[in-house]
Structures are given as C-alpha cells and as structure tokens.
Image: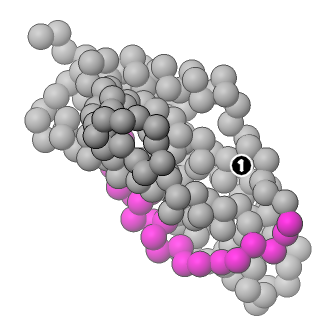
Amino acid sequence: MQEEGTPVHNYVYSSALVEFVRAANAFCAFLEQLKDTEGRTFIVDSVKHLSTVYASIINTGETEPVLESPSEPAVTEQEWSELFQRIAMILGPYNDILRMVDEGEFDRSELVNHTISEDLADIYQELRDFTTIYSRGMEELMNDAAWELKEHFAEHWGAKLLRALQALHLLYVRGIDPGEKE
C-alpha cells in the first residue's frame, strides 16, 4: 500500500473520486436490480443516475497510470447481454433511437438505428469493471482503473451516456410510460 500523502494515495481516496465511486456503484446496483422495475420508474431513475454519474466523473480530476498492464474486465458477455435484454424489455418500442453516424463507422447513411439498452449496457460494463477493481483496495490498480475509465469516458462512454440521457430525457418530459398499453 502506498503511504498516505503520495499522489496515487491522495487521488484514489480523494473526495471527488470516492463520490464518483458511490455514483457508479448506485447506477450499477440500480441496473442489477431491474427485475420488477416498471417503465416510467426506469426512465425517471435512469435520468437521475446518469446525471449523477456524469456530474461526478467530471469532478474527479486527472491521474496518470503507474502500472504496465491494462485492467481485466469483470463483466462477462452473458451478463452484458442479459442486462441489454432486460432494459430492452422495459423500454419496449421506446428503446430504439436514431443517431448520427460516428466518425470511422462504415455505415454510409447519416443516421443509424441504435438502442438505449446498448448504451446503458456499455456504460454499466465500464462502471462495473472499474468499481470491481476499485473495491479491491490496491491503490496502484485503483489509480490505473480510474485513469483507464477516464480515457474510455473521453473516447466513447461519455458520449453514450449523454446520448442515452437525451433519449431518456425526451421520454421523461413527454410523460412516456413504456409499460402502459396504448
């Protein structure tokens, strides 16, 4: 363990990073306990959690990696797929969204079909992988996991969070309840 007062120790136990870990754990726990969640409740709670995660990660500051190897994933493909399916079932026809094609994608159209459930499952995977490593209490690993998470936030999952939040926001303000029969 690093001595108190070292940069790694100070970063991994900073109040901002600890607050982010709380937000990430709360979001993951929310998604892991979706069994009886209704559509409108899911929308409202997702908006709250996503907003908190986004606000807290931008407060975490910067760090640099101290180890050579990247972290090991904790979320399996099966766990990701099960979560994706649960969210898709809750949102039903409101799961589908149109989005602009990202740079480097092969699709030739300007808009592509996408799903909220894919973005949320991807965000879950990033956050659960991070919180699993962070919970082990090994400061160098905690630091590097935070650095890697911030890199991935800038590369892809931050944009996914905002895209999902925007889609869920529209459902929220329109008063949509995916569980109601039309």
User: Looking at this view, is 167 or 30 the one in front?
Assistant: 167
Type of residue at label 1? Thr
For label 1, the residue is: 132
Residue 82, image quadrant: top right
Image quarter (top left, top right, bottom left or bottom right) of the N terminus: bottom right
Q: Is residue 109 left or right of residue 65?
A: left
Residue 40, image quadrant: top left
Q: Residue at x 41, y 60 (%)?
A: 54
User: Looking at this view, is 138 or 149 the one in front?
Assistant: 149
Estimate how packed mark 1 is, as few (under 14), some (14 to 19) or many (20 or more) residues with alpha carbons within 10 Å: some
- From the top left corner, tell me how far across and down residue 12 is, in percent: 68, 73
Q: Does the magenta stretch include residue 66?
A: yes
- From the top left corner, tell me how far across and down residue 42 is, in percent: 33, 32
Q: In this view, does 14 lie to the left or right of 157?
A: right
Image quarter (top left, top right, bottom left or bottom right) of the C terminus: top left
Q: Is residue 84 left or right of residue 169?
A: right
Q: Which residue is drawn at 35% across and 52% down?
A: 162
Q: Residue pushed farthest top? A: 181
Residue range of the region highlighted in magenta in the rendering: 44-68
Q: Can residue 71 be seen in this view?
A: yes
